Image (tube, rainbow, N blue to C red):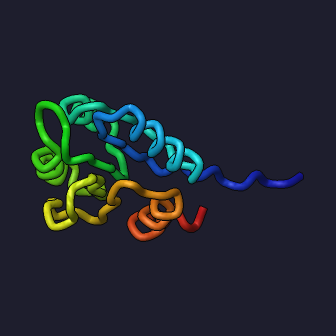
């Protein structure tokens, strides 16, 4: 009788972007990398999402309707300090707030995997 291997929990990722195309593309890249993905079209929706379940990594666009990405980044750092923050934007990197990593647009699947490898060590072990 063989003993089944333990099932590892998927890395939980929150994507916050007001562009449906960008949310879909990021979701696809992270799901292909084996992550469990939640998406939000606004900062306010993101706050509701992470208040129910803390992500390990959040990808935040800066240009959001209502509360912007700069303010959401600061709020998430205060509310969920254990969550790694990745800023993704078309703006120049010099305009990004302090974060754990950046994912300038346009991005590739390889860049998404590098962010996971760099920020979530258990991901690379999966």
> Residue at 48% across / 58% down in the picture?
108
List x then y, in percent, for residue 126: 60, 61
Which quadrant of the view contains residue 44? top left
List x then y, in percent, for residue 24: 46, 37
> Residue at 52% across / 49% down in the picture?
29
Q: Would residue 79 be found to the left or right of residue 49 on screen?
A: left
Q: Nearer the viewer, residue 56 or 92?
A: 92
List x then y, in percent, for residue 90: 27, 53
Q: Would residue 14 be found to the left or right of residue 66 on screen?
A: right
Q: Nearer the viewer, residue 50 or 61?
A: 61
List x then y, in percent, for residue 2: 85, 54
- Above or below, 15 against 2 in this view is above
Q: Would residue 125 be found to the left or right of residue 118 on screen?
A: right
- Above or below, 46 against 101 in this view is above
> Residue at 20% across / 62% down in the picture?
92
Q: How many marks?
A: 0
> Residue at 17% across / 60% down in the picture?
96
Seen from this angle, which residue lies furthest right?
1
- Above or below, 68 against 4 in this view is above
């Amino acid at each position: 009788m063989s003993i089944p291997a333990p099932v590892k929990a998927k890395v939980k990722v929150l994507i916050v972007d007001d562009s449906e195309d960008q949310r879909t593309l990021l979701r696809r890249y992270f799901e292909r990398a084996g992550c469990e993905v939640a998406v939000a079209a606004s900062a306010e929706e993101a706050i509701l999402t992470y208040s129910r379940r803390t992500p390990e990594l959040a990808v935040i666009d800066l240009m959001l309707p209502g509360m912007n990405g700069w303010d959401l980044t600061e709020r998430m750092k205060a509310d969920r300090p254990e969550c790694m923050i990745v800023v993704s934007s078309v703006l120049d990197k010099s305009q990004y707030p302090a974060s754990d990593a950046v994912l300038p647009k346009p991005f590739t699947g390889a860049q998404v995997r590098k962010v996971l490898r760099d920020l979530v060590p258990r991901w690379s072990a999966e």
